[in-house]
Amino acid sequence: MVAGPSGRRDQHRARDADAGVHRAVGARAREGRSGGLLSRGTVAGAGCVLEDPMMRRTFLTDVAGTAIAPVVTSDLLARGFAARLNGGPDVEEWEAKLAAYGTDYMSMGAADIQRSVAGELVVIQQQLEQPRLWSAAARLMTLHAKTFPGSDGSAAVRWYRMAATATDQSTDPGVRVRVWVRGRAAIALGYEGASLGVADVLADQALSLSDRPLGLLNAVYGKAHAAALRGDRATAMDLDARGRRIFDTAGSHEQASDYAVPWWRLNVFRSLLLARLGDERAATEAQDQALAELPASLPRFATHLELHRGLMLARSGDRAGGIAHATTAMNALPPEKHSLTLRMLLAEIQA
């Protein structure tokens, strides 16, 4: 049984010091370091990409060109060359940047995030002779992948694949980031209803690495959404129950960071899952639980919940009402706050 809000706060407060996976948390585990974890499905072949020193140096350059070319201005190019000539931020400075991005992601729109993170990637790719920085690069790549629609599998999946590979090359901070990167990719793809096979592969990789880090919540709910969209209700419900058990030991009291899964965010995951499964009573309960603790500073997530309600209406037979409800909610959110995930949810309701 999931603990009540006050009990959960007491249980989780002591864990918050290390709940954010952007922090260095010790020497990385040696088990499972081979590229074999990326040998399945559409993520095949990435495991050995960094074996050669030259490949390590050019790993981002070869693939990033297409993705960031539209925003590479003279200023960005100057930043990259300056980092190469003079040295860029050190490990602690990158960790501080990542912590800030974890907060900014919760309220910034996709276009703003993409422009900003593209600039950081230009800089950090000049510093990757330092093995510890592959961990920071991996988290930036994961964030960058979130700015591409999951339906564009060749873009989003490529970035998620690179991010997973990068964590396997880093000597710091250990298994937590390896789990978080894979789990974050899995929940993104599963929630968006895109590249479900890849979501399953990345989630399974996360689950094989550890049974404790916070990233497992993302992985489990990524698999749950994939199962729900395939019509496998029993598996989806089993995974939901597993996710709630994990939350009791790994949930976070921190409210506004992409590295955290507090009670309200768990219920955002569950709200859409249960709406997709057609369980209106449980979905409504999850929505109410989320809204009760959702910070007012995060209106985008309130819009998510309204779109879930629109999906419930559409699934119950009132397609026009569901589309109208979802469209009204989207129009009420300032356009600069829109995310690609919201647009994909709206498309799911309209389908």
Image (spheres, rainbow, N blue to C red):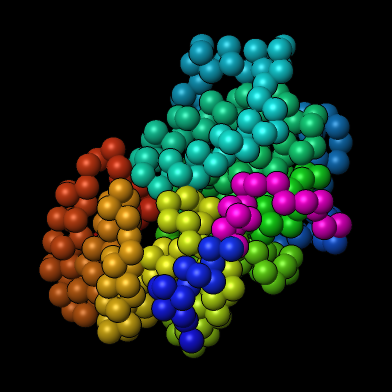
| Any part of residue 278 in sight | no
What residue is shown at x 41% (from left), y 78% (from top)? 4
Q: Which residues are magenta?
A: 15-30
Judge left or right: residue 70 versus residue 280.
right
Magenta residues, dominant SS class = loop
- Look at the image and say whether residue 189 sits in the magenta stretch: no
Give the residue drawn at x 42%, y 59%. Answer: 192
Q: Left or right: 87 with respect to 302?
A: right
Q: Nearer the viewer, residue 102 or 123?
A: 102
- Percent coordinates x, y for residue 263 in the rendering: 42, 68
Residue 21, position as x, y percentages in the image: 62, 52
Q: Residue at x 63, y 55 (%)?
A: 18
Identify whether 173 is placed above or below 183: above
Q: Quadrant of the C terminus?
A: bottom left
| 292 is higher (above) or lower (below) than 136 | below
**Residue 249 locus on image (x, y percent):** 59, 73
The answer to whether residue 102 is above or below residue 66 is below
Question: Residue 252 versus residue 70: which sits nearer the camera?
Answer: 252
Question: Nearest the camera: 261 or 35?
Answer: 261
Q: Position of residue 123 (x, y in %)?
A: 63, 24
